[in-house]
Image: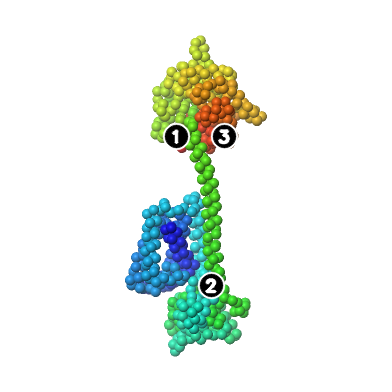
């Protein structure tokens, strides 16, 4: 409620100022004149009016739309505090007839203005102290569109109105207004027009009636102050006067300047038309231009022009006959503001709704993944690093993860010789340790082999089995792997079991078949309990060490298939619990996208695991 009241009040008062900046400039000048400041009612006042109007308008937009909430509500509270003090002073001292809050659109008494400002100040203070209760109508991301649009709208409107005339005429002299009726005291006339007063500067004779009661058309050239009037349009004015003289149409000029000013004007412009005396404020209300032109017909204002668009003599005949152009500008102007804004708000809501929906789904999946299964980033050093290099690498990784805790399980799988020394330099809470292989025999005369029990005895907790390189180069068959898996599990090792198709198999569309056979061949005789110690790693062979990553979609498709295959064999719970890692040219730059997939629970990293910065970059993809 406070948001709407404060927001729309600022919007409305900013709007009337940018729609009629010259009106506001006159009101500002009334203050400077009261304080005796030597500023003329010209350029500076106009700049002040535009800045004030645009600022108020923008604050209104921010508050209504809930954009830049802290800044906007604080600014609104400061403005309201200053305005309340000012209006209290105006109420007490009565320095100006109208405070100017709403231009000429709405004139309030000083008491009403003060009461209005006190209410607004309270509402503004509430908003400033609770900025986050201001409801956001546009997302933070798209808020700039509304801000830029509102700013361009306000500035364009202000500059247009200054150059020509206000697009909406809030003055009593708007086209259609009958001065004659007002002077006759008619109840349905705008009572403000009763101030219309023109006099003969020589004798002081009141000529208001003569002008207002004249039958047909009368031109009134309005020059509030001849000293500051633009005289660049004299020729056109003089042409108009000649036309009027030729067609017996009355043409007067009205000014508030004294005899010197009037004489100066005649010298500068060669004016031959009669000049009448009028009151400055009234002239400023008649037309927002100095000079400006008014066309009356039978005492009714028919048309108004600024010095920048005075009518040409050609075509004037038709204009003389035309009906008052009452515009309809207000609703058009408001429509030009509100409709595009509404469009942005609705589009934003749809977009945000979509984003929110996606985010919601993602969070749900993420939470599910988190609850159900571990996120893991495992490194496979393969046959790289001397003992010293390996220990140093493990140490460096351990330090990096101590300084910046990972958001997932991290495992490094090293050659056999590194296991025991690396176990001595890592914190097992932060970094798990695994072998890259183990024997398919328990123990005995198998020269060169390392058993699962020996692996476990180093402190390692994991072992990679079924890697495509071992399948290809060391001819490890599903049967051999089955033995290895069993022995590893018997020795309390977690098995990272690799599966994946070669390029020809993918090109033949056989990847699912191949992967399923690999699972069946080595894991399907396990019990569900045994299977709970298996981590799967899908490594398409064509992506290993080639720089050619499977797309996130390809990975997801296969991971979903693997999970389904596990569900069919071991049940839904086992399938939900098993972590399925992706391996093959995984890098910091692509890890996030791949890991974001529903069925991807991490990565098995080769080359990038050999540099802490790269490996850490991949680990951080889970942050
Ligand atoms: P790259 O990350 O070097 O492609 O290796 C993947 C792999 O084989 C991990 O086991």
- Callout 1 secondary element: loop
- Callout 3 secondary element: helix
Q: Nearer the viewer, residue 119 or 128?
A: 119
Residue 503 spot, x, y in % from top left: 63, 29
Residue carrying label 2: 308
Residue 217 in sight here: yes
Placement of 135 over or under 477, stated as above or below: below
Query: Which of the two labelled residues, at mark 1 and mark 2, occupies the earlier sequence position?
Result: 2
For disc 3, the neighbor class at 10 Å (few under 14, some 14 to 19, many from 20) is: many
Q: How many marks?
A: 3
Q: Nearer the viewer, residue 122 or 35?
A: 122
Query: Which of the two labelled residues, at mark 2 and mark 3, occupies the earlier sequence position?
Result: 2
Residue 273 in sight here: no
126 vs 198, left or right, is: left
Which residue shows up at 57% across the image and 83% down it?
A: 216
Please identify the quarter of the rendering in which residue 60 is found: bottom left
The Cα–Cα distance between marks 1 and 2, rounded to whole angstroms, is: 68 Å
Which disc number belongs to residue 234?
Answer: none
Which residue shows up at 57% across the image and 76% down it?
A: 324
Q: Is mark 1 within 8 Å of ligand 1?
A: no
Residue 386 spot, x, y in % from top left: 46, 22
For disc 1, the neighbor class at 10 Å (few under 14, some 14 to 19, many from 20) is: some
Q: Nearer the viewer, residue 320 or 605?
A: 320
426 vs 448, left or right, is: left
Residue carrying label 1: 407
For disc 2, the neighbor class at 10 Å (few under 14, some 14 to 19, many from 20) is: some
Residue carrying label 3: 556
Residue 91 spot, x, y in % from top left: 35, 70
Query: Which of the two labelled residues, at mark 3 and mark 1, occupies the earlier sequence position?
Result: 1
């Amino acid at each position: 409620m406070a948001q709407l009241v404060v927001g729309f009040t600022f919007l409305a008062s900013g709007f009337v100022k940018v729609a009629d900046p010259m009106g506001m400039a006159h009101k500002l000048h009334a203050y400077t004149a009261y304080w005796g400041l030597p500023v003329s009612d010209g350029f500076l006042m106009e700049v002040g009016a535009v800045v004030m109007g645009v600022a108020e308008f923008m604050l209104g937009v921010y508050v209504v739309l809930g954009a830049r909430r802290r800044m906007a509500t604080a600014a609104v509270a400061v403005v309201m505090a200053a305005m309340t003090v000012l209006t209290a002073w105006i109420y007490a001292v009565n320095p100006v007839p109208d405070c100017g809050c709403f231009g000429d659109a709405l004139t309030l008494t000083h008491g009403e203005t003060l009461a209005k400002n006190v209410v607004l100040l309270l509402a503004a203070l509430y908003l400033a102290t609770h900025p986050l209760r201001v409801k956001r109508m546009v997302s933070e991301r798209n808020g700039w569109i509304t801000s830029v649009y509102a700013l361009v709208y306000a500035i364009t409107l202000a500059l247009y109105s200054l150059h020509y005339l206000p697009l909406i005429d809030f003055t009593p002299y708007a086209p259609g207004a009958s001065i004659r009726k007002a002077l006759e005291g008619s109840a349905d006339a705008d009572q403000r027009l009763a101030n219309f007063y023109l006099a003969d500067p020589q004798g002081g004779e009141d000529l208001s009636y003569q002008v207002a009661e004249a039958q047909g058309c009368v031109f009134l050239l309005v020059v509030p102050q001849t000293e500051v009037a633009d005289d660049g349009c004299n020729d056109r004015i003089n042409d108009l006067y000649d036309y009027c003289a030729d067609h017996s149409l009355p043409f007067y000029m009205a000014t508030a300047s004294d005899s010197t000013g009037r004489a100066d004007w005649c010298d500068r412009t060669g004016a031959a038309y009669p000049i009448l005396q009028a009151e400055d404020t009234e002239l400023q209300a008649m037309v927002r231009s100095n000079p400006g032109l008014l066309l009356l017909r039978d005492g009714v204002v028919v048309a108004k022009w600024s010095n920048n668009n005075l009518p040409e003599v050609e075509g004037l005949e038709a204009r003389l006959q035309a009906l008052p152009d009452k515009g309809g500008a207000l609703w058009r102007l408001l429509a030009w503001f509100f409709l595009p804004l509404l469009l942005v708000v609705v589009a934003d809501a749809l977009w945000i709704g979509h984003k929110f929906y996606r985010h919601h789904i993602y969070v749900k999946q993420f939470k599910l993944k988190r609850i159900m299964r571990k996120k893991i980033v495992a490194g496979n050093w393969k046959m790289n690093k001397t003992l010293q290099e390996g220990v140093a690498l493990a140490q460096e990784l351990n330090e990096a993860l101590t300084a910046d805790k990972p958001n997932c399980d991290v495992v490094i799988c090293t050659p056999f010789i590194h296991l025991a020394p690396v176990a001595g330099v890592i914190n097992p809470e932060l970094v798990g340790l695994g072998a890259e292989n183990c024997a398919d025999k328990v123990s005995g005369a198998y020269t060169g082999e390392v058993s699962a029990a020996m692996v476990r005895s180093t402190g390692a907790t994991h072992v990679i089995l079924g890697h495509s390189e071992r399948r290809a180069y060391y001819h490890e068959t599903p049967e051999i792997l089955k033995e290895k898996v069993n022995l590893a599990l018997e020795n309390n090792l977690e098995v990272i079991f690799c599966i994946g198709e070669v390029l020809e198999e993918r090109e033949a569309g056989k990847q699912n078949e191949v992967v399923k056979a690999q699972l069946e061949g080595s894991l399907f005789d396990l019990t569900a309990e045994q299977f709970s110690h298996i981590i799967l790693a899908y490594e398409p062979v064509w992506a290993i060490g080639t720089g050619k990553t499977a797309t996130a979609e390809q990975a997801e498709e296969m991971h979903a298939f693997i999970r389904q295959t596990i569900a069919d064999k071991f049940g839904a719970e086992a399938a939900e619990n098993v972590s399925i890692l992706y391996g093959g040219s995984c890098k910091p730059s692509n890890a996030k996208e791949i890991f974001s997939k529903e069925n991807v629970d991490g990565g098995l990293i080769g080359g990038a695991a050999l540099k802490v910065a790269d490996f850490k970059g991949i680990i951080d993809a889970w942050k």
